Image (cartoon, rainbow, N blue to C red):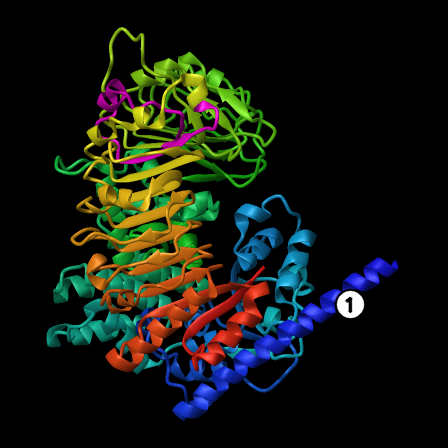
């Protein structure tokens, strides 16, 4: 080894030792606070959180696992929660992961869902929470990055739903044993997997009679008591669930939305009892089938469709994609008063209320952004879909005949397969086929070589076209014949580096509802003989250099989501200023969400007027003065505001009476130094995110008095701003008794020691503050 390498290693060791010392000092501060409050670790009360309502029968197991995870054993230790599907293993793990004792104990927490068909790269990406920046790295590079992140720190890793020792062996080598009490928690359905992983095993038991009834009542009646006339048949339904938490939750949720009559509930019990019993999984599926059987007919195809999409991990069950597919498939029926997308949102909410699907992720305004479905329910969907001919999964050797909806698990496609009657083809390497023969197609989701768009002639029924273009393709010019696919609702290209050039004929496609590309160039509709109105178009993104002339705004009057970008050479190329390009944007009276990005800082001023319908606004690299925010603060229903970079001036003094509906505020990379604000300026703010505000002196004291405030998150901000956040937290706890406000602080590693010294000098502690260092 070269002398330079040895010097580098010695330098790294010194950095690790310094960080250990700093982390030790932080832990000492925490311990002093615990002693002052006379609350030993082992007697810390259970945290009340959203998941705890589903923790019936789990409390003893939760305490046991917390004790095991926070015990004195110094070496890296692996623990498994073992039990059949639907018993609540993941729910128990989620409560552990979010428990305050765990948050305070471990420097790093990371979660990955493994599932039956695992992918080592995806597991590591989940643990790193950095899918965008790590997409081009292989497993070894990702593993090395994870190892460096965990090295020298006390960490908790949770691997949920692991099915094989092979999956464990793929990633275990990247978990360092730091000798400081780090832990790995696995959940699995297979006892032999738990044993082969060398872990301590906790068996997740079925719920007993009392626990089952308590959980059922929480789901079927929520805050109400069980009517006396339903108690007998209700307990019979619970008995038939045989202590399986998932079955109880799903059936209870279904009955919450069903008639509360003895006759109806008896029919549910009879459905459960008449199902043939075989193996454990089959028993669970039979119990769950009752919930499917009692769904309203309008919800059944939607539920089955989500299960099929889950089986191929389609778009990570993105809500927008699901809704677009439901519209294209014709699952939704108009009621005259709502657009189809709104009806779809109601259907999704009803499926969530029935506990058939789960909320995977919410957007900043609280709306569901992604959903999820339990594996047992996914299996049920696949089974029913196959029995009813709703969807067919193609595998090698399968000859396609009269099937209407086809989905692929791989790139294989039989050359003898000619699905001329197919209405839906998804996840397919369906290239160089004669598309004009498949005139019934409504949905086409394909891996394209870049030429497939030329073969769309004749697909008059096609409503949904999604193409994944290869990574080597950087520009795609769509043909003018695209307008012949006159019934197209959704046009989607998934390649993040692809620039799509649309023909002028796209302005004639009146049925278009959604255009989604990473970058799309739309020609100005000048020169067209007749300007049509695309009154169905709701989503357009990301349109590059689009001039929102009066004509364009008249063409898209009902647009709801708009993502615009303007390039550095655009002004010189078109000889137009940005303000001239956007001066008509206030004509879009239905616009709810606007993202505006400029590659170089263009100047906007008070001449610009945003539509009053805006609910969400994101501005990136715009040259604003802080006083210019008055035109934004006056928007009456604005709930989400994100601003980033190149804001002139260092002082912001909000105006009284503005931002009255704002719930989420993110300020990123600005030169803000002095922020003069009180609770009245943001009266219902819930989340405040500050990033890279290196000059900010402090967070305004009055921000802490906002009664709705739930979170202050600082990342790479000044130490004084972070200190002010901790002071706000302590003030709220001491004077108001409010311990619900969360403070999350990420401090650059180079400033870590200075920050710790400031905390100690101020007599503050990091108790109930989530803290980590960044590089």
Q: Would you call the spot at circle 1 few (<14 residues within 10 Å), some (14-19), or many (20 or more)?
A: few
Which of these two is toward me, 126 or 693?
693
Q: Quadrant of residue 624?
A: top left
Residue 754: give x, y in percent of width and height: 54, 71
Q: x and y percent of residue 104 in the render?
A: 47, 77
Image coords of residue 241 (percent x, y):
33, 70
Q: Is residue 547 rendered magenta in the image?
A: yes
Q: Quadrant of the N terminus?
A: bottom right
Q: Camera-side residue: 400 or 614?
A: 614
Label 1: state its secondary structure.
helix
Residue ID for mark 1 = 10
**Rendered view: 282 above or below 431:** below
Relative to 766, 618 lies left or right: left
Q: Say whether residue 270 is magenta.
A: no
Magenta-colored span: 541-570
Nearest the viewer among 725 and 514 is 725
Q: Is residue 461 above or below residue 724?
A: above
Establish if 525 lies above or below 414. Answer: above
Q: Quadrant of residue 331?
A: top left
């Amino acid at each position: 080894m070269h002398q330079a390498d040895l010097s580098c290693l010695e330098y790294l060791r010194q950095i690790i030792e310094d960080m250990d010392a700093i982390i030790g000092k932080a832990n000492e501060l925490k311990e002093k606070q615990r002693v002052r409050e006379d609350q030993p670790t082992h007697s810390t009360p259970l945290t009340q959180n959203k998941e705890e309502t589903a923790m019936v029968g789990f409390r003893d197991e939760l305490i046991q696992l917390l004790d095991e995870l926070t015990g004195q054993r110094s070496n890296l230790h692996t623990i498994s929660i073992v039990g059949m599907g639907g018993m609540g293993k993941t729910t128990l793990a989620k409560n552990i992961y979010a428990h305050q004792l765990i948050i305070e104990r471990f420097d790093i927490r990371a979660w990955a869902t493994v599932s039956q068909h695992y992918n080592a790269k995806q597991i590591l990406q989940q643990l790193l929470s950095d899918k965008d920046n790590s997409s081009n790295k292989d497993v070894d590079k990702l593993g090395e990055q994870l190892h460096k992140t965990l090295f020298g720190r006390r960490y908790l890793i949770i691997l949920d739903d692991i099915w094989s020792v092979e999956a464990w062996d793929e990633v275990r080598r990247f978990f360092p044993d730091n000798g400081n009490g780090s832990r790995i928690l696995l959940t699995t359905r297979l006892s032999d997997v738990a044993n082969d992983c060398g872990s301590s095993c906790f068996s997740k038991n079925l719920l007993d009679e009392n626990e089952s009834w308590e959980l059922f009542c929480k789901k079927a009646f929520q805050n109400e008591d069980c009517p006396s006339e339903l108690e007998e048949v209700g307990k019979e339904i619970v008995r038939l669930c045989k202590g399986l938490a998932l079955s109880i939750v799903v059936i209870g949720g279904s009955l919450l939305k069903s008639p509360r009559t003895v006759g109806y509930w008896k029919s549910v019990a009879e459905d459960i009892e008449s199902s043939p019993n075989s193996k454990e999984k089959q028993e669970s599926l039979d119990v769950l089938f009752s919930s499917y059987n009692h769904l309203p007919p309008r919800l059944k195809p939607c539920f089955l469709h989500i299960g099929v999409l889950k089986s191929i991990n389609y778009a990570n069950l993105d809500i927008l994609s699901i809704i677009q597919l439901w519209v294209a498939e014709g699952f939704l029926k108009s009621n005259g008063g709502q657009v189809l997308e709104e009806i779809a949102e109601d259907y999704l909410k009803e499926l969530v209320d029935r506990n058939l699907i789960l909320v995977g992720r919410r957007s900043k305004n609280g709306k569901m952004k992604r959903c999820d479905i339990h594996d047992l329910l996914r299996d049920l969907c696949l089974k029913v879909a196959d029995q009813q001919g709703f969807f067919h999964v193609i595998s090698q050797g399968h000859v396609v005949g009269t099937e209407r909806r086809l989905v692929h698990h791989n790139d294989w496609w039989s050359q003898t397969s000619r699905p001329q009657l197919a209405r839906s083809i998804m996840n397919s390497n369906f290239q160089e086929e004669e598309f004009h023969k498949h005139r019934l197609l409504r949905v086409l989701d394909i891996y394209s070589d870049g030429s497939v768009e030329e073969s769309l002639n004749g697909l008059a029924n096609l409503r949904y076209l999604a193409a994944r273009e290869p990574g080597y393709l950087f520009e795609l010019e769509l043909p003018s014949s695209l307008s012949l696919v006159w019934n197209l609702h959704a046009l989607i290209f998934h390649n993040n580096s692809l620039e799509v050039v649309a023909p002028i004929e796209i302005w004639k496609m009146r049925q278009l509802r959604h255009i989604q590309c990473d970058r799309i160039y739309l020609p100005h509709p000048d020169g067209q003989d007749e300007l049509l109105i695309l009154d169905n178009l709701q989503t357009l993104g990301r349109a590059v250099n689009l001039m929102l002339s009066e004509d364009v705004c008249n063409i898209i009057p009902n647009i709801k989501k708009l993502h615009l970008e303007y390039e550095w050479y655009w002004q010189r190329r078109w000889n137009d200023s940005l303000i001239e390009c956007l001066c008509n944007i206030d004509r879009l009276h239905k616009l709810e969400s606007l993202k505006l990005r400029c590659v170089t800082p263009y100047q906007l001023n008070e001449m610009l007027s945003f539509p009053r319908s805006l609910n969400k606004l994101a501005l990136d690299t715009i040259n604003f003065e802080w006083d210019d925010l008055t035109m934004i603060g006056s928007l009456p229903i604005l709930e989400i505001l994100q601003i980033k970079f190149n804001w002139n001036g260092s002082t912001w003094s909000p105006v009284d009476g503005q931002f009255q509906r704002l719930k989420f505020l993110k300020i990123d990379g600005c030169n803000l130094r002095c922020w003069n604000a009180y609770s009245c300026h943001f009266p219902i703010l819930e989340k405040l995110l500050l990033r890279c505000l290196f000059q900010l002196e402090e967070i305004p004291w009055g921000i802490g008095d906002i009664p709705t405030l739930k979170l202050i998150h600082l990342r790479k901000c000044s130490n004084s701003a972070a200190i002010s956040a901790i002071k706000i937290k302590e003030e709220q706890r001491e004077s108001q008794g409010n311990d619900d406000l969360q403070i999350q602080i990420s401090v650059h590693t180079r400033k870590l020691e200075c920050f710790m010294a400031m905390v100690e000098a101020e007599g503050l502690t990091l108790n109930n503050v989530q803290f980590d260092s960044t590089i």
